[in-house]
Amino acid sequence: MLPAYLPNPIAALCGGGAPIDGGRLYRDGRRFFGDGKTWRGLFAGILAGVAAGVLQIWAAGTYGISMLPQQTLLSVALLSVGALLGDLAKSFFKRRLGKERGAKWPIADQYDLVAGAFLLLLVFNPAWLFSEVTLPVFICILIITPLLHRVTNIIGYFLKVKEVPW
């Protein structure tokens, strides 16, 4: 999951600049995503996730590390892109519900990246998804994801990358 876990914090760290929605409003009068979702953050996050996945592929092949998932360039790309698309989708729905940037939305805030990554894998690479994400792995993902989310948000808050520690 490293290629899916890494894009969001890197997007927050490297973000800024032009917002993805260009400041446009949806028909409800609210922004599509808001200022927190930028093109620079999107591309930096995807690049970081892909780089982490390529490093996993290299490490598994070079050192025979069998405990790593059998990543492919396609799985790495789908995990990285899917994580950020899941975050964008969550932001879209947060705006529709009237929630402001940084407002808590339990469960959705923690699992948006997993849902987005798995959805893309399900559509474009289901064989990889079902061979690598077994039931025990899925349960571990469900347990680890909110813990990692909390820790990275606290770190981001102390580094002044995030305005709130959640």
Image: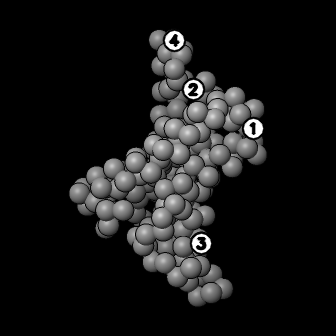
- Packing grade of label 2 (10 A; few <14, some 14-19, many >=20) is some
Q: Is 121 displayed left or right of 46 in the figure?
A: right
The residue at the point 49 percent across, 56 percent down is 110
According to the image, label 4 marks what residue? 64
The residue identified by callout 3 is 93
Q: Which residue is mark 1?
A: 126
> Foreground: 60 or 143?
143
Q: Is residue 5 visible?
A: no
Q: Quadrant of residue 74?
A: top right
Q: Position of residue 49 (x, y in %)?
A: 50, 41
Within 10 Å of disc 1 (Cα), the crowding (few <14, some 14-19, many 20+) is some
User: Element type at marker 1?
Assistant: helix
Amino acid type for the residue under numbered disc 2: Pro
Residue at left offset 52%, top offset 29% = 54
**Residue that appears at 59% across and 72% down:** 93
Which badge, 2 or 3, is on the more N-terminal residue? 2
State how far apart marks 2 and 4 are (Cα).
11 Å
Q: CA distance from mark 1 to mark 4?
A: 25 Å
- State the SS at label 3: helix
The residue located at (45%, 43%) in the rendering is 144
The local crowd at label 3, few if under 14, some if 14 to 19, many if 20 or more residues have their Cα within 10 Å, is: some
Mark number for residue 69? 2
CA gap, disc 2 and disc 3:
32 Å
Three-letter amino acid code of the residue under disc 3: Phe
